[in-house]
Amino acid sequence: MFSFGKKSVLILLILFILIASIGWAWKQRDSLPFITKPLQMVVTPFEYGASRIMNGVTTGIHIVDVSLKNRIEWEKLEKENAELKEKNVDYKELISENDRLRKLLDFKNSHHQFNLVAGSVISRDYGTWSNTLLIDRGSDDGIKKDLPVITPQGVVGFVSDVYPQSARVQLLLDPRTSIGAIVQRPESRVASVVRGNGNSPSEPQFVNIAKEADILEGDTLVTSGFGTIYPKGLYVGTIVSIHQNDNDFVKYAVIKPAVDFNRLEEVFVIVSFKETGSYDKPSVEPKLVPQTQRDKVEGIKGAAAL
Amino acid sequence: MRTIWWIITAFVVFILQSTIFPFLFNGITQPNLVLVFVILIALHLGSRPGIIAALVGGLSQDVLIGNFFGLHLLPYLIIVFICSSMGESFDRGQRILSLLVVLVGTELYLVLLCAVLWSSGQYVELTPYLVQYSVPLLIYHAICIWPVHRVVWHLRNEDTFSFEGYR
């Protein structure tokens, strides 16, 4: 343990006096400027430097601290953002799917004369000459060969091959496909065949039309019901241009299909239908055709017919 | 173990051709990955694997993807015959030559396709048909060739059965 001898007491006393002197000197620093000022002048740069360094260190620590916290926060936000983006994509996909399915459902509900089976497109074949797609409904779902395939927008094609779980649909765009069609305009009612165009698949043609027949650009084509596959009144497309050679006895028209085949995801197969006449027939209103347009197509004879 | 790579490759190509490409492209033209594979396999690996690729790829496209039997199979077989006979004197390290062969093969394929259609009684006009399909197909195939070339090269290095003539 400690032993307090004379020497220790003396040291303590000296320390006490020294501390007391320094304390007194500090207290009287203004009255002893010749001591404190030079000392202050000497230490100030060091204090300043040390202070700057400490400030820097503190700032650095603060920055690192904030950065780490921000980094953690950022990673968290990034994760949340990715999740939200994913949810947003899923949400949009659901909305889109919901929209499509709602249209299909509305169509199904408004066409009671059709017994419809809905199917999703699972594979497509195009880019060569043929134009077909595969749907996820087959003979197990009551699908048979030669059944018409439609969407609420119009005719898609017909079932060309049937498998237990799937079926192949030969599209309206396929050159082997022919659909009996009729011009919807009441003054016209020209009937012929819509056929796929192998040279330009996006432009099927309304072919073998008599040279004198009354067809115009913008005319709507619907199925004629003359064949064995398609019921009457399904929207096929719109005439966009009419072509005629002077030497030919017939003319043809290029049509814009009602269905957007690039965005085909769900389709209906008409398993059976009854000709009750209860379906929503298009409202027939007299369509006034400008004289000049009719003249362009039919010449003076068409004008005289008006 | 080597055969499994062939099966996996065939399966991936089939899925790409039948399901993924149709949803990615414009609905009129899409790359014919099977054709690019058939040409490069015939060119780099010889007639036997080329014929197998043409049979498997052509039948798949005609029966499983499309519904016109012979539309792809016959042109593929003819192209394989030409490419494999070329391949014996072909510098297989030259990627640019592979590219040229694939592009010429694509045009030949379109012409042969028309011939098959004509012979089956289908009406098609050669010039509009080529105009419609040539340019997009050539661009698609020029892009496809690099990854396909790598895969075929990998298969060639991996494989040990049946390609005695070219190794």
Image (cartoon, coloured by chain):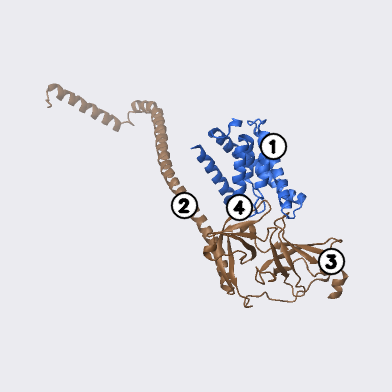
Instruction: Return the residue at label 3.
Output: A296
Contact, mark 4 vs mark 3 (Cβ under 8 Å):
no
Mark 2 secondary-structure assignment: helix
Instruction: Return the residue at label 1.
Output: B100
Mark 4 secondary-structure assignment: helix
Marks 2/3: CA distance? 60 Å
Marks 1/2: CA distance? 46 Å
Chain B color in figure: blue
- Residue A232 in the image, given as x and y percentages of width and height: 67, 72
Examine the rendering and report whether any part of residue A42 can be seen. yes
Mark 1 vs 4, N-terminal side: 4
Marks 4/2: CA distance? 42 Å
B64 versus A277 height, above or below:
above
In the picture, one chain is brown; tell me its letter. A
What's under tag 3, amino acid-wise?
Answer: Lys
Instruction: Return the residue at label 2.
Output: A83
